[in-house]
Amino acid sequence: METGRVEAFSDGVFAIAITLLILAVGVEQSIAGGDLQHQLLHLWPAYIAYGVSFLTVGIMWVNHHQVFRHFRRVDRPLLLLNILLLMCISFTPFPTRVVAEHAHTAGDREAAAVLYGLTMTCTAICFFAVWIYGSRKLLRPNTDMREVSGITRSYVPGAPMYALATLVAFFSPVASLVLFGALAIFYAISSSFFGREPS
């Protein structure tokens, strides 16, 4: 099967998931009294959660496109791995909303950040599985193997780094979110180096 149909379906899932992220931000979440300006400022955890998730899902969409341009076709195992990845992507708005709603509650803040981190870790594992399977079984004949090696090297630390950021959530949920944002920026930079279109 050609990759076009898979990419079109995946684009739809990415688009819906990234759109639903805005539901993580809502004035009704604010527990602060006072005027609207104060309430909007009180929603800062929702803004951070939204920004980190939007950037992460957006970069994964970019990298998903870059990954699939290396594949000559898709087979059933790759389809199933891609479905698992899309399942994690479509789940992302839920932990984002949980973080946004419970960041002000000391007792719930840690659990919310851990849920978010576990979601990101599972997503990273699925993304790596898609790449590692496709790069070993389904590469185009004219693929630059140096580029393939570079992509692999950039993806190998992904899941362990997300897992580490999740562990940080037990000590500082805010620091954990900052690390997730840093990881999104890292993959944005790495995709610009290893995911360039052939000239």
Image: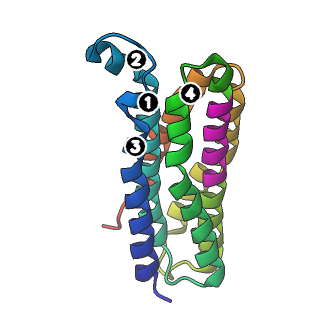
Name the mark on residue 182: none
For label 3, the SS is: helix
Task: Looking at the image, tell me whether mark 1 or mark 3 is earlier in sequence order.
Answer: 3
The amino acid type of the residue labelled 2 equals: His
Residue, disc 1: 46
Single out the mark in the foreground, 1 or 3.
Answer: 3
Which residue ends up furthest to the bottom in the rendered image?
1
The amino acid type of the residue labelled 4 equals: His
Q: Is label 4 or label 1 in front?
A: 4
| Relative image position of residue 82 (x, y in whole percent) | 57, 70
Looking at the image, which residue is at 47% across and 71% down? 68
**Residue ID at (66%, 52%):** 122
Give the x, y percent position of residue 26: 37, 33
Image quadrant holding the C terminus, namely: bottom left
Disc 1 crowd rating (10 Å Cα; few below 14, some 14-19, many 20+) is many
The structure residue drawn at horizontal position 60% and vertical position 84%, both measured from the top left corner, is 75
C-alpha distance separating marks 4 and 3: 14 Å
- Tag of residue 102: 4
83 vs 3: above or below:
above
Mark 2 or mark 4: name the one nearer the start of the chain: 2
Query: Which of the two residues, 183 or 38, is positioned nearer the viewer here?
Result: 38
Q: Callout 4: few (<14), some (14-19), or many (20+) C-alpha neighbours within 10 Å?
A: some
- Residue 42 tag number: 2
Q: Which residues are magenta?
A: 111-124
| Circle number at residue 23 | 3
Rendering coords of residue 6 (x, y %) = 46, 77
196 with respect to 107 (left or right): left
